[in-house]
Image (spheres, helix red, strand yellow):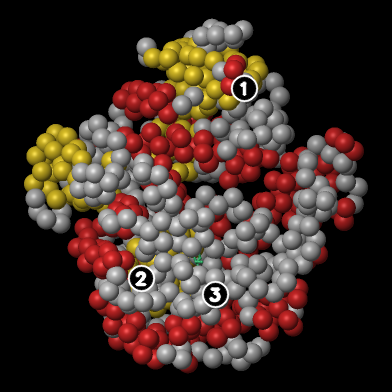
Amino acid sequence: MLGGHLLHGGDYNPEQWLDCPEVLEEDIRLMKEAGVNCVTLGVFSWAVLEPEEGIYDFGWLEEIIDNLARADIQVILATPSGAMPHWLTQKYPEVMQVRADGQRNLPGKRHNFCYTSPVMREKITALDEALSERFGRKDNVILWHLSNELAGNFSDGACHCDLCQRAFREWLKEKYGTLEELNHAWWGRFWSHVYTDWEQIHSPAPHGETTVTGLELDWRRFVTDQISDFCGMERRAVAKYSELPVTTNFMDTFKNIDYNRLQKELDIISWDNYPCWHKEKDEVPVAVRASFSHSMMRTMKKKPFLLMESAPSVVNWRNNNPVKRPGMHMLSSMQAVAHGSDSVQYFQWRKGRGSYEKFHGAVLDHKNGSDTRTFREVSEVGKRLPRLDQMLDRTVNCPKAAILFDWTNWWAVEDITGPRLDLDYPACVLAHYRVFWEKGIEADIVDMDADLSSYQLVSAPLNYMYKKGWDKKIRKFVESGGVFVTTYFSGMADETDLCFTGHHPLEEVLGIIQEEIDAPSKEFENLFVYAGKEYTAQRMCEINRAKEGTEVLSVYERDFYAGCPVVTRNQFGKGEAYYLAAESDLAFLRAFYGDVFERTGLKNALDTELPYGVTVTERTCADQAPADGDAETKKHKGVVFVMNFKNDPVCVECAGEWTDAETGEVCRDRIEMKAFGSRVFVS
Ligand code: GLA
Ligand code: ZN
């Protein structure tokens, strides 16, 4: 476990308070009171660390790090590339991004530097190396935090300057070798878009090319690679004098950058979680999304991740910003840990007095200091986490199910001018994941490059694009006993977005033949009966034929495609593949996955039916997790989290005895949960 315990703390910006020594003293005293054991320093400190070009001022930072050390508080040290000082942008305008419309940004804001610019790279490398030399071996510094929310510039995350255009063309040359290959991949003869000179290639732009989907995809891949390259460069810079691991803070399903690529530059995954709690009284959809993102972060390295930022109470950037209602802070913090986080960190420790984020929640408020509900609720988390340290050490969740969420597929699906223009890939995947969450069946969130061998069930909703090798991987997975679920509009295009011709790449495995895709309007919605109940087929209805031997579990009831299969199951090798030909609703997904889980033998950690709003996860000892997922062997090594996202008490009926790891209470056949309660059991 990094730092030797679960981390509790967050972003600390003492550079905003350097002229108030009493504030800095109070900070440390109150950190101890709140049970803070780790803070993140330096995220936006460039202007103070290097007030003039080449002149470093690190004394203030050293003093703060040393004061923290005396108080036994660890430090995550950031490199400050997230925001640029004005002397830099004034002297070297090339460091500022050029937008897709060709306009260069003016100075200001953050997350908006050019990832290619040699000047930017040189300046930040020099500063990072100096930071590494000075702080990289300090006892209480435990991790490098590279930059901040990379690609988070509120538009496409990219820079379209001439340097980036040139780098893009080089990237394409490397990928395709010849223009002939590129023109083929991008289907260049369509609308006469054949490139005859590499110099003709330009990034997608509102006043230029937006219709060549192959170009769009390659541009997004290039941007991801360029940002990852920048991140790798910062990694090497801090490694010059330091052996500490590195991270950067991700945002959840963030479209600008493929985190599964960027993560390769990192040792530890961390992310910033800002769910919109209390948007409605039903917290489940928001909880589902947060669990999904936590699980995705864990899956990237199949290791514990860090919750790097979360709001102690409000954020300031939504239209209306509700406070976290009593109990929600503890619950949402525990939710992260339950899914594999080894930390609960906040943005931020103390509210600044001015500028853009002065009303963003913090542990310490402008007025009343620590005498606030927020501070008390944060302190409760600070008391609770140390009780879990030991039992969670070297544990992580090891699900037997996985759901596909792949960035390239996302980009492709939402670029399509096809059956519908309003396809929402994350929403579709979340609709499926929600059923797993409700039933307490944990899932890893994988991309198409993942190793599937540890899973019994893989679900791939709206899997439009098949990257090279994906069909073979699934074929092998099913052949050797895995259960695969996929849906309408799957297996349509290869990774350059060229449509497959002839057959669906997995036709044999799925046992269906796709013929047409209807995107009916409301009045033409269809119906189907599954396990005795009627459901609507809406928005996307594939008109398919079942191959001989495929079991048809449900057919369309109406219209000219009445009788065509909606739900099928095909035995292939030792496994089975399900195909859902139409989009339906949550009620159907609940019924469908209920059957799949039962048939596959997937159970939640309590082996029970959970009441609405409650979910369960389990962290098992990474070293001892049984390869075959045998529930019996696992039983004594797990830490089970039960969480109630309803603001009412609820009782979970479950057979057997469950010992509350914190109170020692033995629960027999039922677990009582408080409103927004979370409990931890050792099994
Ligand atoms: C992001 C940033 C932080 C802060 C928070 C506010 O996560 O990394 O610097 O701006 O948002 O919610
Ligand atoms: Zn650029």
Disc 1 marks which amino acid?
Ser
**Left or right of residue 73, residue 117 in this image:** right
In 3D space, how far apart are the residues under numbered discs 3 and 1 (Cα atoms)?
Answer: 47 Å
Instruction: Determine whether 241 is above or below 421 in the image.
Output: below
Q: Going 14% across and 50% down the picture, which residue do you hit?
A: 660
Residue 233, position in %: x, y? 60, 70
Q: Nearer the viewer, residue 156 or 5?
A: 156
Report the Cα–Cα distance between label 1 and label 2: 49 Å
Categorize mark 1 by other alpha carbons within 10 Å: few (<14), some (14-19), many (20+).
few
Is residue 40 something that shows in the picture? Answer: no
Mark 3, secondary structure of its residue: loop
- Residue 380 at least partly seen: yes
Q: Name which of mark 1 and mark 2 comes first in the sequence.
A: 2
Q: Residue at the spot x=55%, y=9% of the render?
A: 558
Query: Badges 3 and 1: C-beta atoms under 8 Å apart?
Result: no
The reply, left or right, for residue 183 in relation to residue 486 is right
In the image, the residue with mark 3 has its CB under 8 Å from the nearest atom of ligand 1: no
Judge by depth and name the residue closer to the eye, 562 or 567: 562
Label 3 vs 1, first from the N-terminus: 3
Where is residue 79? Give x, y as percent: 53, 75
Disc 3 residue type? Ser
- Do the residues bearing badges 1 and 2 touch, measured as CB atoms within 8 Å? no
Picture quadrant of residue 377: bottom left
Q: Is mark 1 within 8 Å of ligand 1?
A: no
- Image point 37% across, 12% down: which residue? 532
The residue beneath circle 2 is 363
Q: Residue beneath label 3, please?
A: 355
Q: Earlier in the sequence, mark 3 or mark 2?
A: 3
Label 3, residues with CA under 10 Å away: few <14, some 14-19, many ≥20? few
Secondary element at tag 2:
loop
Query: What residue is disc 1 on?
Result: 521
